[in-house]
Amino acid sequence: MAEYGEWNRKGATLSDKTVIKDYGVDREFIVKGIRAGKLEFQERSVWGNPYFVILRRQLKQYIAEELGDNHLSGIIKQKKIHTLKKEINETKHKLQGLELELAALEKKE
């Protein structure tokens, strides 16, 4: 069962589309968990397009039970690696821009 206010807490819920993208499972896996009573959900829609909202805590527990802790930790690790690489590339790009700006300023002197 969901804790009091868990549905309203920031970061506590995920849409089915986000689950599929971030955790590498398919929609059938989610529906199977809902039917088994392992996942609570709310049905919502945007511009007439329906989607499920699932509690992150229950999803992680369900993935660990069904696919194993290794699958879940591997996915979390890959997501962290992707985030770090993206941040490194953004920082490199920003540094190059700053170096060009500095060179232009030094040239004017």
Image: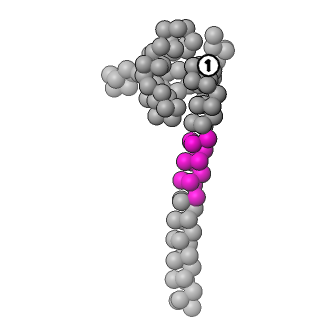
Above or below residue 34? Residue 17 is below
Residue in the image at 38% along x and 25% along y: 46
Q: Nearest the camera: 68 or 76? A: 68
What x and y, as percent, mark residue 38? 57, 12
Q: Which residue is mark 1?
A: 65
User: What residue occupies the far left of the structure in this picture?
Assistant: 48
Residue type of the residue flagged with mark 1? Glu
What x and y, as percent, mark residue 68? 61, 25
Q: Identify the secondary structure beneath mark 1.
A: helix
Residue in the image at 55% along x and 8% along y: 37
Residue in the image at 63% along x and 14% along y: 2
Quadrant into which the N terminus falls? top right
User: What residue occupies the far bottom of the structure in this picture?
Assistant: 109
Magenta stretch, main secondary structure, is: helix
Quadrant into which the C terminus falls? bottom right
The magenta-colored residue range is 77-88
What x and y, as percent, mark residue 21? 46, 34
Specify few, some or many for label 1: CA neighbours under 10 Å numbering under 14, 14-19, or 20 or more.
few
Q: Is residue 8 visible?
A: no
Q: Nearest the camera: 80 or 13? A: 80
